Amino acid sequence: MILNMKWANGLAIGLLLFFSSSCATYYQINSEFNQDFEYGNIEAAKKVLDQNKKAGRKKAQFLYFVNQGVVNTMLGNYEKSNVWLEKAYLFGEDYQKNYANIAASFLVNPNTTMYQGEDHEHLLLLYYKALNYLKLNDYEAALVECRRLNLRLNELSDKYRSDNKYKRDAFINNLMGIIYEASGDVNNAFIAYRNALNIYEEDFSEMFGVTPPDQLKQDILRTAFLNGFDTELDFYERKFDMQYKSSQANAEELVFFWHNGLGPVKDEWSVNFTAMDGGNGFVTFVNEDMDFSFPYQIGSSGEKSQLTDLRFFRVAFPKYKDREEWYDRAVIQVDNQRYNLQLGENVNAIAHKTLEERMFKEFSKGLLRAATKKAVEAAIRGGGQGGEEKSKEQKQEEAMREGLALLMGVVNAATEKADTRNWQTIPHSIYYSRVPMKEGENRVTLKTIGPGGQVSATDFTFDVRKNETVFHMYHSLETKR
């Protein structure tokens, strides 16, 4: 028995050390890539990805695909970027739940399952794809991404029918309007702009503190005029207290998207629950401080006894850790004229919202995982033989069971880990503006304003053809973390 216990304890300590060494978050595991990316060493970041091709076949392959998409976009490799982003899109379309992995997640942790991607991540990858096509002057392909975006938005609406859910995206509708208008379809552009306005007013203003940009209001007035919608034009002029002047319309334009900062990274936190006898075949997990109470059905009275005897359970859950924006605002300067870049999408707030909306599900899954692990411990430990005299073999078997149960308890504690995977190269927020251009070469300066009014300037040159709308995206990677 002593040998058995020594063996079990030794193995338990060894496994504890092994699992403890692998308890880093997804951000920490990919520290080399993240450091290169955050410092703007995009070529080096791409090299890290290229040297880790196995990641494209593992359980976080979606994140590998979208990260390749982002770095290639930032390097100007728009066609190559879209190859990777299309892989991510098809992954989302073809995603099939692997029930063997799901079962394993209840015995280990959620990281054993394939990372599916968050709702907003699947929208953003199509946003990047559309911008890539716009940079390639392929409006028809950009419109295909618009249609895909519309389908994804409809899926969100079907998925979340209740109010106060992230089920519509104002900025994505706004983007669709911009693309439709650039391709010459001012009717669909007006519809998309109007839809975006409604979502900003009805959803985004309350949920994310993002109000309709003035640029969107101007776009609605212009497309109403271009469509000959006199009634709508009059209505929105009065609504916005703005007067549309057709003389202000410009045939050549730049639509500039500014990505400010970096979105949040997933970390983990844990909650201690007390297992209480809930009666009628149930054990109730309770955390009084947080006012949480979750019932769990028990298969037998012996299992209930094992769970309630253990009393305390630690369960790990994901949480977002913010990377605060360094720059407060930005302007585009052309020929001594300034155009404010306006907030269109608070990606950071949307990420928090999507996680918040499924936290009850996360709690339920986490407690089921904890209960399943403890049930396995109970099954290994087994029942006693009563008060009768036990043989040497029975004592050895009981000691072995106890040792294995102890080992399983150590492994269960060491492997209790939240899923900290998420797309970590997306911006904190997206700003945009429509800027008048002239035919030929245009020099443009992006001025970003940080703490204390400190200004950083970045220059661009755009060669604009007659009646052309050009597009550009720039990502300021600086954060306060």
Image: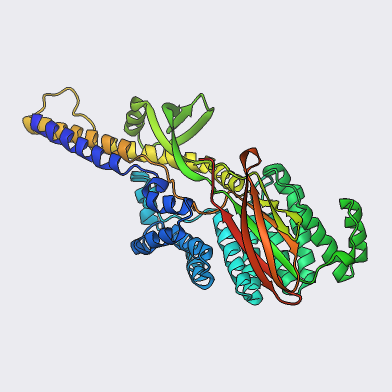
In the rendered view, would you say 183 is above or below 284? below
Locate residue 213, reporting x and y percent: 75, 52
* Front-most of residues 229 and 183: 183
* Left/right of residue 325 with respect to residue 340 in the rendered view: left
Q: Quadrant of residue 381?
A: top left
Locate residue 111, reporting x and y percent: 38, 49
Locate residue 472, reporting x and y percent: 63, 64
Q: How is the image coloured?
A: rainbow
Q: Residue furthest left?
A: 392
* Front-most of residues 111 and 395: 111
* Front-most of residues 282 and 52: 52
Q: Quadrant of residue 101?
A: bottom left
In the rendered view, would you say 70 is above or below 364? below
Residue at point 27%, 39% (across, down): 411
* Left/right of residue 399 with respect to residue 166 in the rendered view: left
- On the rendered image, what quadrant is the N terminus found in? top left
Residue at point 85%, 61% (across, down): 221
Q: Is residue 158 visible?
A: no
* Left/right of residue 422 with respect to residue 260 in the rendered view: left
Residue at point 62%, 60% (across, down): 459
Locate residue 284, reporting x and y percent: 45, 30
Q: Residue furthest top?
A: 387
Q: Residue furthest front?
A: 336
In the rendered view, would you say 95 is above or below 206? below
Q: Is residue 270 visible?
A: yes
Number of marks in picture? 0
